[in-house]
Image (tube, rainbow, N blue to C red):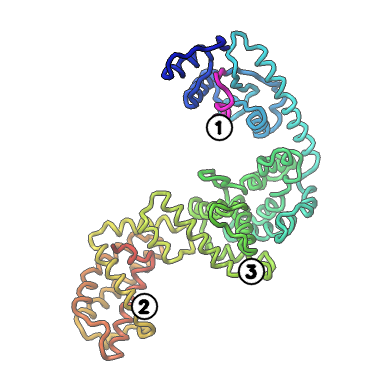
Amino acid sequence: MSVGVIDIQHAGDYEAILEKEGRVIASFDKRRAMIVEQLDRAAGQLTWLRDDALLDEVTALVEFPAVYEASFEPEFLAVPQECLILTMKANQKYFPLMDGDKLTHRFLVVSNMKVADPTNIVTGNARVVRPRLADAKFFFETDKKTPLSARIGKLSRVVYHNKLGTQGERVDRLVKLAATIAQRLGADVMQAERAALLAKADLVTDMVGEFPELQGIMGRYYALADGEPAVVADAIQSHYQPRFNGDALPQGAVACAVALADKLDALIGFFGIGQIPTGDKDPFGLRRAALGVLRMLMETPLPLSLPELIDAAAAGFAPELLTGDWRTANADFFRERLRHMLRDAGHDHKAVDAVLALDPVRIDQIPAKLAAVKAFAALPEAEALAAANKRIVNILKKSGAEAGTTVNVALLHEAAEKTLFAQVSAVAPGIEAQLAAGDYTAALKALAGLRGAVDAFFDGVMVMAEEPATRANRLALLSRLAGLMNRVADISRLSV
């Protein structure tokens, strides 16, 4: 394609002359843009399957890109399209053409040769991809001859981890844990058990052996071919989700039960044997697993207690296997993942710290609590109450065990403490009802009405009075107030 020897008089002319006479596009970004434009044009009414990583790879493989359309025999479309797409992208660097969500038998090739008659290029690429597709078809047809249920026994010969046993032993744990979670969600326990039992069976199929990226996906196809219920088949595929940041979550209670079981079993098992992620090292994908658990609980949402889920997962392991203070390390790990996740989502860091300071067990309630803290922080009384709460917490911390357990009305001498007690007693039932109903915003806003009484109390009352009974009674009043103020979040964290 080049004119031959190229004479460049000035360095500034290098790029333009190289393109015109040498047929080399020096700029990566320009080549990439040319490929995208040509792919768009060649696709016509169809859509080329966008993959930015593949696009970058192809851009780096060519100097003067030209896009051509080729095709394969429609009979190969009987193979699950994920197999064909992966084959074309991973092995041949082709861009499949889609009709909506459905794969067509046509694909686009990015060539390094721009020629008037591309027949040889088109037929050559069609010829090269055919054996790959034939292999995929052979694997699929062969795998279907053996039901997934008949493959479960082979998992006992597949090592999961030398300290955590085989995949077969892991499946036994997943079945029990998925059943426990499904029961708590009110889902079909038998379907959850069946999905968990079959979830890893496709690991010993020929297709997944050739293309590990298809684990779960092929399990769903094989389960449907075996006549398993759609709910079970869908759970087999989606129990790996979310696979990456922004990936879709499992849909339905059965799928969520199996997905949670899979991730929690991995987290507890590896933390139990001391394989905790450090720095950038996370060989077992535990950060991704923890984020998956948190996203499912929060975004689905699922009314489950995270500590109870952890306990249920831990019950599947021999007690002597879980060594060291794994539980504290695991709780800290979840808390930090949650903190980063919420901050990355744009929530105010003070609000996040205030909510997480109470170690909430119900992750599904956190968005509502954050919204309540945000609404409370916008009130004119918020800063003063947050500062007062911080002062109360410090006083109670320094006082140790001096605070009484209940407030004795007879020991309330000052007008300000009587007023505060009366107002706290008046709003408490309403706040408790609002908290029980999950209306955290209304509960926090109700606290704003206490600002005047709180300010007056600190202005006119000596909390640490010399008389022990009076001091203990006033500390009891502050303890009751703090308990009411800090049910949704530790609002002292909002103080500057």
Q: Give the camera-side residue of 1 and 165.
A: 1
First-in-chain label (2 vs 3): 3
| Magenta-colored stretch includes residue 56 | yes
Mark 2: which amino acid?
Lys
Q: Residues within 10 Å of mark 1 (few under 14, many from 20)?
A: few
Residue name at image x 31 percent, y 56 percent: 375
| Magenta-colored stretch includes residue 215 | no
Real-space Cα distance between discs 1 and 3? Answer: 43 Å
Residue name at image x 58 percent, y 69 percent: 325
Real-space Cα distance between discs 2 and 1? Answer: 56 Å
Q: Residues within 10 Å of mark 2 (few under 14, many from 20)?
A: few
**Label 3, on which residue?**
323
Q: Which mark is residue 249?
A: none
First-in-chain label (1 vs 3): 1
Disc 2 + disc 3, Cβ < 8 Å:
no
Q: Which residues are magenta?
A: 49-66
**Label 1, on which residue?**
51
**Label 2, on which residue?**
397
Mark 1: which amino acid?
Asp
Q: Position of residue 468 (x, y in %)?
A: 30, 90
* Direction from residue 138 to residue 103 in the image, left or right: left
Real-space Cα distance between discs 2 and 3? Answer: 33 Å
Q: Image quadrant for the N terminus?
A: top right
Q: Nearer the viewer, mark 2 or mark 3?
A: 3
Secondary structure under the numbered disc 2 in the rendered image: helix
Secondary structure under the numbered disc 1 in the rendered image: loop
* Direction from residue 439 to residue 269 in the image, left or right: right
Q: Position of residue 13 (x, y in %)?
A: 43, 16
Secondary structure under the numbered disc 3 in the rendered image: loop
First-in-chain label (2 vs 1): 1
Q: Position of residue 353 (x, y in %)?
A: 39, 61
